[in-house]
Image (tube, rainbow, N blue to C red):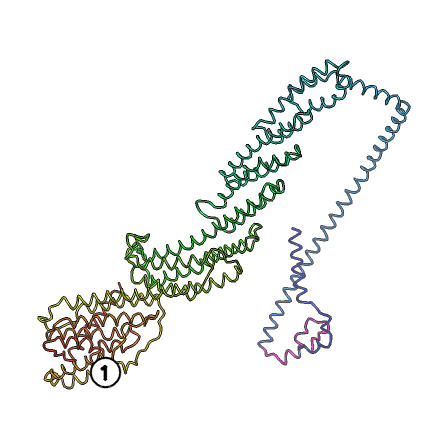
Amino acid sequence: MAEDLDEKARRVRELLSSFYKSDESDSGVSARRRDTLLQINTKGFEPERYMASLVRKTNLPTLLKKHVEMAAEIKNLDSDMQMLVYENYNKFISATDTIKVMKDNVAGMESNMEQLLEKVTAVRTKSDNINASLFERRGRIEELNGTRSLLRKVQFVFDLPKRLRKCLKEGDYAQAVKFYVGASPVLETYGSSSFRTCKQESEEVIATISKRLQAKFLADSEPLPGRAEAVALLQQLKFPVDVLMDGFLTSNMKHLLELQTLSHKSKSPDDSKKFISEFTQTATAFRSIFPTGESRLNEAAKDLLDKYFANVNVSLQPEAGSLSAAELISLLKSLSADVAKMHEVMPEAGFIDGAIQAVESAVKQHVNHKFKVLYAQVTGALSDIHSPKQEQAKDQQKPLLLSLENVQNLIVNGGLEVLKDLTQLLDDSVDFLVSWRDAYIDLVQSGFQEFFGSLVDHFISLSLASATQGEGSDQRLGSPAPGFVLLLSRLSTFIEQEGVPRITEAVGDSFIGGSLGDRPAFLPSEICRAFRAAAEKFLRQFIDVRSRKLSIMICKSITTPNWLQYKEPRDVRMFADLLLDEVKGMEGEVKQVLEPGKSHRRSDSAGSSSSTRSSNTTRGDSRSSRLNNRGKTHLLERDVAKLFKQRVEIFTRPELTQASVISMVVKIALKSFQEYVRLETFSRCGFQQIQLDTQYLRDPLREVVDDDNVVDFLLDEASKTKLSVCAAAAERCTDPTPLEQAVLEKIVHTKREKRLDDEATKVFI
């Protein structure tokens, strides 16, 4: 309650202080230069000037608002002042009551002190009287005490056999040895005369006690303090030291070996601490009992140390699971502390060398495990991407993009996490790693070199899974999908351009130095070259697979019909839709994975000028077109010859962009279209069907390539492109009479509207 009142009072004081605070320094020249409106809280505040200035500079609504605000503040301050007065009044009443209670307590205490003083005075008087009465007899009392002590010693010697038997019966060997050692001078001096019987009986009892102490010393179940006590008692009885030393080492080293084995199996920190504690106690007890037995102690501890470090290696390098850097550092620090304790007890035993070897082995295993886990995560993610069991990708709008981002994050963030984990071993300055720093840096750098090298090899093996099926570890994956191969190409480029530089920068920040050894150094340029070559290989493989699939589709569409008996075309063949669907699917994959790149499109007006000119010419004189078939055939032949003079580069070096890849696939497919057409013989209807198909394909294909000239050269009827396919068909046609342009455009327009409706229905579903 008092604390609440104090808190309220403090809050009220702060409110009052914040409102009425004054600063003496503000009364100077600098304060007078301020605006009068800001001096309301100073001692020199002039209300009349303030009001005059306020009325002059402020309008009526603002004055009313200011009035309301000040009235509210005044009411709040008045209520706070009243509350502060009430609280201070309550504190004053409470203090008055407390003072009254203290006054009453002090009054009762004075009477108690007077009674205590009277009693102390009476005790002192009686003590003085007793001392005075005994002073005259003090000398006689001391003489009698001396005689009594002598009689007790003689009686002690006579009672020694009896006392020893009693101690033997009760198991109080320490007291028995104490009695015997204390009486030994008398027994040695007078044991052949007056105390012969006492000496013989005492020696018989002591011999029995000595045997029991030896048995206790050699007992495995006896705790270390008990055995140490037995050794000390036997030493007092002048038992041979060498025999005791051998027995001590044999029993204790066996016990420590069992304890170490138990500690390793249970993996309990308490058992480990118990082992270290008992080892330290054993070594300390041995040194305190046998100061000259250091060499024997080191020999006996050799087997124990070998077993200890074997178990340490197993703890630092578990077969199942792995240790984080924090856990490893904790174990290494614990090992360092334990070894320091044991080394302090036995510096000649070689604990430091054994610990350094164990730490180096554990750190190597930890580094290798981190890179193995990172490699397994990346390869596992890649396996999941193109595994046939991955059905959830169907429900995703951009599965390749999501997979690409996932693998990119795994490589970069995973690599940085590995570096962060491994850097802790340097930042925490583990004692045993100080002398091994350069080798550790080499180990980490070579780990990244091997990781990226293994990764590029894995990429290549995945891209060749169909060729290596049944031989390698990727047998379950089967042939890779084209989109997956394209993803590998994009991923390789990402690693070359972003992944390796970021990892290199992080490695340079933390792992500087190192010495060249038998392990490969981290060479970013070599890694980048490998991934660059792999990216080009995968890109060509994607283009080859996609173009081959389109070529097979075109081949079937050309070789299957009987073109000489073909009926008059009324619609675009289904193969054209299938071809566009395939191109659209490829376009979707490419757009998910690759950047757009540069386009070389012509303007819409220029791009359609040739088609418009062709349309107008054909509409204006369709009858003349029919009458001059031979002339058109001659023109086609001339344009075919022109094709070989003005070639479009088909097999160029592809770039890792959407436009370049799609254009390359389309060019190869259309080139295949041309070559397959040249192998067939067409009737007039067959030729018109080819004309209709190419006209339908022209605009959709022009939308996906980077250069309109590609499609114009290979498909467009009024320019170079369509001449390649249609001219080839005309050369192989018995009557190369083309369709009327109006009929051609009507069929194509109807087909495109139907395709758009079908696509809209699919999207809605």
> Residue at coordinates 46% horizontally, 48% vertically from top-left?
322
Residue 640 shown left or right of residue 85 in the figure: left
User: Which image quarter is the C terminus in?
Assistant: bottom left
Report the number of discs: 1
Q: Is residue 49 magenta?
A: yes
User: Is residue 517 or residue 113 the one in the foreground?
Assistant: 517
User: Is residue 592 or residue 273 the one in the foreground?
Assistant: 273
First to last magenta residue range: 36-60
Residue 126 shown left or right of residue 395 in the figure: right
Residue 557, x across and y down, in percent: 17, 67
Residue placed under numbered mark 1 in the picture:
610
Q: Is residue 126 magenta?
A: no
Quadrant of the image occupied by residue 217: top right
Label 1 crowd (10 A; few <14 / some 14-19 / many >=20): some
* Amino acid at pointer 1: Ser
> Residue at coordinates 27% horizontally, 73% vertically from top-left?
650
Q: Tell me the SS state at disc 1.
A: helix
Quadrant of the image occupied by residue 142: top right
User: Is residue 725 or residue 39 the one in the foreground?
Assistant: 725
Residue 14, x across and y down, in percent: 66, 62
